[in-house]
Amino acid sequence: MTTSEKTIPQAKAKPVTAPVIQGMKGGAKICCITAYDYPSGLIADQAGVDLVLVGDSLAMVVLGREDTLSVTVDEMVHHTKAAARGVKRALLVADMPFMSFATVDRALDTAHRLMGEGGARAVKLEGGQTVAPQITALTEAGVPVMAHVGLTPQHLARFGGFKAQGKSAEATRVLVEDAQAVEAAGAFCVVLEAMPVEAAQVITEAVTIPTIGIGAGNVTDGQILVYHDALGLFDRFTPKFVRRFAELGDDSRKALEMYCAEVRRTTFPGDKNTFYMPTDEVAQVRKIKIKPKKK
């Protein structure tokens, strides 16, 4: 069994850094997952995940919104701070929300908050050639940047919905140029979302930084999924590229149904869940006279 195939104790393993991820290009597959709070960050870290992303997807899977566009920097900082308390080994990356990196100055301010207040060790932003100046400024300021091309959810209005990208030779050429642009700007890896496996293969071969796929086949250098999708905790819709590795939503619902049933039958709490006084104290308690409250 290799190191990547078994759970890595948090206290014994060396922290994963952006250079470590970058150095995994063409080697062992990089395992990434999202997390949004202390328990999900802790579980992901204990499972041996290499990179934990506090994604702006929290707007949908945690806050119940229709898309990712309304999540704020304040909310991202809050959830990143919580996840950071659980993530000790994996590289903790925080998403930069919609319009928070529209200019270089805004990008620097947002990164400062996500890393300074939130405790992230890198940031992620969506876009290709158009955000290269922001990536350059961030990396020059010492901020590791994870890029994201292909289907970028913050651009759904332009795409007209959740639609796969790179479905033609020309579209793939544009994606290659985007990936090469973010690499040249200093990104240490790049997410490839929702594209044909052939396009992902070409992009992966065209850059020297790792590609992290989500809906891009198994040819990328790593994979990422949303925590709630992988564990069956989000059922509003399931993208084609998602595989549920558990059905914790169903299990949780059944557990709470059992809880309600036992409360109503008065079988919970039982003796094991109840505190009792010493017998002599019980006798004294029964002598206490309760004065009725004045109306």
Image (spheres, helix red, strand yellow):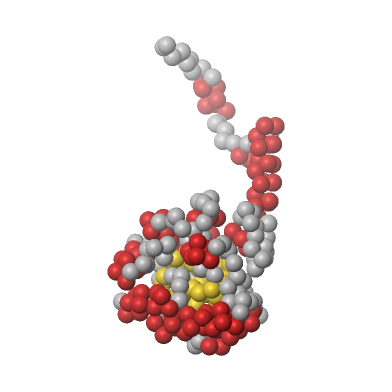
Identity of the residue furthest to the top in this view: 295
Kindly identify the residue that appears in the image at 52 percent across and 56 percent down: 67
Kindly identify the residue that appears in the image at 62 percent across and 76 percent down: 167
Which part of the image, by quadrant, shows the C terminus?
top left
Give residue 79's position: percent from left, percent from top.
Answer: 44, 57
Kindly identify the residue that appears in the image at 65 percent across and 60 percent down: 238
Examine the image and state in which quarter residue 226 appears. bottom right
In the image, 170 versus 78, the foreground residue is: 170
Describe residue 167's horizontal placement relative to residue 69 as left or right: right
Above-or-below relation of 157 to 187: above
In the image, 156 versus 2, the foreground residue is: 156
Residue 117 shows up from this direction: yes
Examine the image and state in which quarter residue 247 appears. bottom right
Give residue 21's position: percent from left, percent from top.
Answer: 49, 80
Kindly identify the residue that appears in the image at 55 percent across and 67 percent down: 33
* Total residue callouts: 0
Describe residue 293's horizontal placement relative to residue 61 as left or right: left
Examine the image and state in which quarter residue 118 appears. bottom left
Describe residue 146's horizontal placement relative to residue 29 as left or right: left
Which part of the image, by quadrant, shows the N terminus?
bottom right
